[in-house]
Amino acid sequence: MPDGSLWPKISVIIPNYNYGQFIEETIRSILLQGYPNLECIIIDGASTDNSVEIIKNYEPWLTYWTSEKDKGQSDAINKGMKKSSGEILSWICSDDIFQKDVLQKVAIKFKETPDCHFLTGDGYYFTGINNVLHYIKGAEYKLIDLLDYDLDKYLPQPSVFFSRIAWQDCGPLSLKADYTMDLELWFKIRSRYYLYYLPCTIAGLRFHDFSKVSSKNIHFTKAVRKLMLEKIKLAPAYLWPYYLMRWNSFYSKYLFYTARKGLIIGFFWTGKLFILSLCYSPFEFIRSFKTHFTIRTIKRNVKVCFRNKINLFKIKN
């Protein structure tokens, strides 16, 4: 530490399953931090791609790793936490990356603030190389602020660190929450500890078709809506109708988006999604319809659909 004291031990868990195309970049973003008191633990869910071969290349610098069947991402993270011994804990998915020198900054913040048990910073979504889709600005959010997830008041998961004390009080992760286990943990920790903010970019979250938070993943948006409606009681009773309306609109929008994409390639089940979108929020359905079904977009969608059918005909013949 700058004051001559020992650096606190930081444990970073990497859960992985068949992300061989990304995991090496994740591992290197941790190890190249050059942090002097680091635990890097990888829990692989018996991947069938090249993940294990890549992990073995970095075995000398890993505290622990294993590759075995598990009960999902939450189970893998819980296993990693049990193997860890750090004072400061975090996990990062095997398709995300840390920015340079962030672990030193995190450690200094925890050291300078003795009552810090919960810390967040900035993050960003990206695709490919240097293609930033969306920047996420952090803040010292109150507990009720976490209900505004859809208004960018959310904690980018790999940019969040917490103390072992907080984990022991609020963990482990729920095995039932496959998509919202981090959000559930943030609600638990924030209900007991103050959230501190480190004003720097900590991590990048890779956005791709197979990521859980992909806008194409209707299961993710459904799970987020369900959790937020369960947490409505955190707000004053007079605000409950407002949050109910907003989260129904949030889900309706993604139902419509998914149905529209299905319609382009000719799926027949899209009618059900359109109806559900209308039922959850007629206002959002009408607004989405006006946005996506102008004469211009209809012409473009018809052309795409026609071209897809021609390509399918060529493949069959």
Image: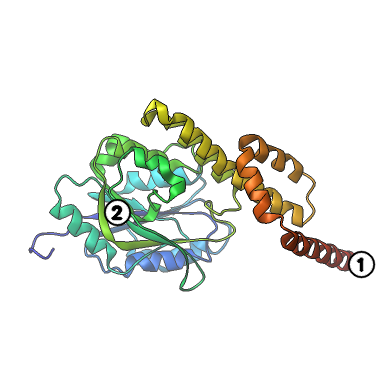
Q: In the displayed structure, does residue 279 sit left or right of residue 167?
A: right
Where residue 93 appears, as percent x and y from the top left, is: 44, 55
Q: Helix, strand, or loop for circle 2?
A: strand
Give the number of marks.
Answer: 2
Can residue 309 be seen in this snapshot?
A: yes
Q: Nearer the viewer, mark 1 or mark 2?
A: 1
Disc 1 crowd, CA 10 A, few/some/many (<14, 14-19, 20+):
few
| Residue at x 75% of width, y 64% of height | 300
The residue tagged 1 is 317
Please name the amino acid that badge 1 sits on. Asn
| Image position of 191 with respect to 221: above or below | above
Please name the amino acid that badge 2 sits on. Ser
Q: Quadrant of the C terminus?
A: bottom right
Separation of residues labelled 1 and 2 (CA atoms): 56 Å
Q: Quadrant of the N terminus?
A: bottom left
Disc 2 crowd, CA 10 A, few/some/many (<14, 14-19, 20+):
many
| Residue at x 23% of width, y 62% of height | 105
Where residue 312 appears, as percent x and y from the top left, is: 84, 63
In front of the other: 96 or 135:
135
| Image position of 225 with respect to 10: above or below | above
User: Disc number at residue 11?
Assistant: 2
User: Disc number at residue 74?
Assistant: none
Using the rendered view, name the quadrant where residue 252 is placed.
top right
The answer to whether the residue labelled 1 contacts the one labelled 2, judged by CB atoms less than 8 Å apart, is no
| Image position of 85 with respect to 233: above or below | below
